[in-house]
Each structure stands twice: as structure tokens, then as C-alpha cells.
Image (spheres, rainbow, N blue to C red):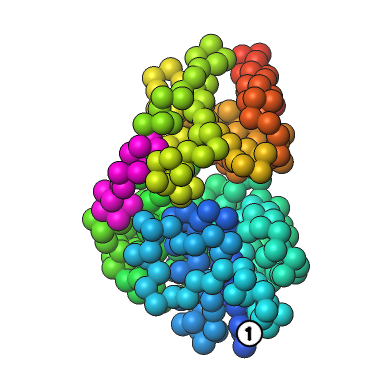
Amino acid sequence: MNLHLPELSPAFSRLLEALRDREVAVIGHARPDGDCIGSQVALARALESKGIRAVCVNPDPVPRRLRFLTGEMRFLKADDILPVADRHAAVFVDCADHGRAGERLRQAFPRPVGNIDHHLSSVGFAEHNLVDGTAAATCEILAGAMLDTGIPIDAQSAQALYTGILTDTGQFRFSATSRRSFVLAGELVARGADPAEAGFELYERESLGKLRLLQTFLSSLTFSCGNRVCIGVLHDGVFASTGTTAEDTEGLVDYARCVEGVEVGVLIEERSDGSVKASLRAKDPVHRLDRVAGQFNGGGHACAAGLTIRMPLATFQARLIEALSIQFEGLSAGGKGS
């Protein structure tokens, strides 16, 4: 049999064996996206199919547009799991580092049993690390591993995995999209995933507040680095004024990237605690945005990265532009990104 993940699937089997007869907390990252929630749902259901009790845990609630994936699956917040954390083995999904789910969950689960992730900046912080930086999504890793190891995938799990692949490939448009992405998506559709439902829930249920937030973001766009970089800023207080929440920023940065001639799009959020959060998106992986974000203690992928840092907005924006300028200079000199 041709395996989808010949190197990682045996490691997945070893992880499942290590979790036998244990209660498991499947932990996702802050401000969870489709790949995070999809991975949690699919892995938790896979564990339960093996007789392993599992619960999903996130520092933030499941976004409105992703609730169609959860079904009867329990999702707990940090406050809910902390009193019983010592009873659970932890598996982190879609987390490039141990702190991606927040400091409280990192401390509550100091020795995770598993880590399943696809970020280039991912570090091995668990006993069993299933990391593939070439995969377009953590759900792609899980789909391949579950098929390779014979774990049953019902319609709900298939929808969760398909949604994770769909969102992290940008509807199969981003450069990380591969033949394997399409093959696995097809296998998931064959097992009950509904592309029409996923498309409707994700992309055709925008609130009026989200449109107001988009309008604010678009009005803030500025250009730098010879118009190769487009930056939009959301100032502190914008969520209250538009009737939105942080989850409504999903997808906004793509509007900055999609401008003709722009190579890198940036969304910067100013926060009331004096920190900023930035999302970086590039059209070409040569820009290695994971390395740019790494200069600010962030990380991610070559084309998609993020960071959160305590720094005044103006100072951060200037330093980010400087870092991107240096990156462009390196490319112009014939390098492959600093």
C-alpha cells in the first residue's frame, strides 16, 4: 500500500499507543482557526474510536464560523481544564511552540505527550513530535496519518479535516498546496466531507460588523519598500466601535497582500495592554516570513507568519519595515532570504 505519510504515520501509531488507557486533552492555539479546530475535532474523535477519552481545550472560544465542525465534541477553556490537568495527557495540535496555547496551558501541561504541527518554525517540545513543514495544514498530516493507519474517518471527522485543509491552503490557492493536499481532500469528500457546506459556513456568513471592520482596515492601508509591502492597522478600540471581536480579523490581511505589485501584506492590531499583534502574508515563499516574524519572537510559514510583541505601534511598524527592507535587499543581492 502506498502511504500518504510514510515517515510520520508510524510515529502516529506510536503516539496512539502512548495514549492508550489515558484521558487526553487535545490542545489548540490562541484565536483558533479552521486548521486548529479541524485538527482538534478529528484527533479527539480518532482517539475516542480507539477507546481513549478525549476533550478539546483552547485558550479562546471556538469562532462562530467554525462551530458547525464541533458537533457533540466538548471544548473546554483553560479555567475548565486546570483543576483536572494532572489527570490528562496532553497533545498539542497546530502549535509551533509550547507557548502557542498560552502560558497557563503551557504550565499546566509541562511535558506534552504529543505535538502535531506543520509550521516551518515548529520546535519539538513533546515526547512524540509529528511535524511536517511541507504539509499545507495540520489537518493534512492528520488526514494522511489516519488513512495510513486505518483509523475510521466518518462524515464529521472528514468535514473537520477538509475544512482545515481548505482554510490553510486559502481555498487551494496558497503555495503550500500540493498534489497530496488535493488527493487527501478528495479522500475526505469520499468519506462525507461537504465542500458546499464548508464554503457557506466559512465564506458566506459575514456579519455587518465584519464588513465595517474591513472598511476600517482598507482605509488604513499604506505602502512601503517601493510599494512591495502593504500594511493595514487596526487601532485599539476598533472592535467596540464596529461591533466585532478579534475573530473577525480572519482573512483581512489577504486584502493587503492581493494588491497588484504588492509582495507582502501585513495586518497590525494595536492592543490596550501596549502590545501589538501582526499577521504577515507573502505571495512567494522566497520571502521567508517565518524568519522575519522570528526577529520579533514570532514564527509560522514561509508565506504566512505571525507574532505578538509588547512594543509601541509606531516603533514596531518602523522596525518591521526595516526588517522587510533588509529581506528584500538580500533577495536583490541574489540570496534566498536572510
Q: Residue 5 placed where, x, y %?
A: 52, 60
Dividing the picture into quadrants, the one containing residue 212 is top left
Give the x, y percent position of residue 311: 70, 34
In the displayed orientation, state which residue is furthest to the left.
Answer: 196
Residue at (55% x, 38% y) in the render: 236
What is the secondary structure assignment of the residue under circle 1?
loop
Residue 271: % across, % down: 60, 41
Residue that appears at 38% across and 58% down: 64
Residue 210 visible in image: yes
Residue at the spot of label 1: 22
Dominant secondary-structure state across the stretch colored magenta:
helix
Check the picture and name the quadrant holding the C terminus: top right
* Location of residue 47 with respect to 329 vertically, above or below: below
Q: Is residue 228 visible?
A: no
Q: Is residue 201 magenta?
A: yes
Total number of numbered labels? 1
Query: Which residue ends up furthest to the top in the rendered image?
Result: 226
Q: Residue at x 40, y 27 (%)?
A: 218
Q: Which residues are magenta?
A: 199-214
Q: Which residue is located at x 57 percent, y 52 percent?
A: 118
Amino acid bearing label 1: Arg
Where does the N terminus fall, quadrant-wise?
bottom left
* 274 or 281, nearer to the observer: 274
Query: Where does residue 231 sit, x and y in percent of width and height?
Result: 51, 25
Q: Nearer the viewer, residue 282 or 187?
A: 282
Q: Is residue 32 above or below residue 302?
A: below
- Per the image, is 91 magenta? no
Quarter assignment of residue 321: top right
Residue density around tag 1, few if under 14, some if 14–19, many if 20 or more, within 10 Å:
some
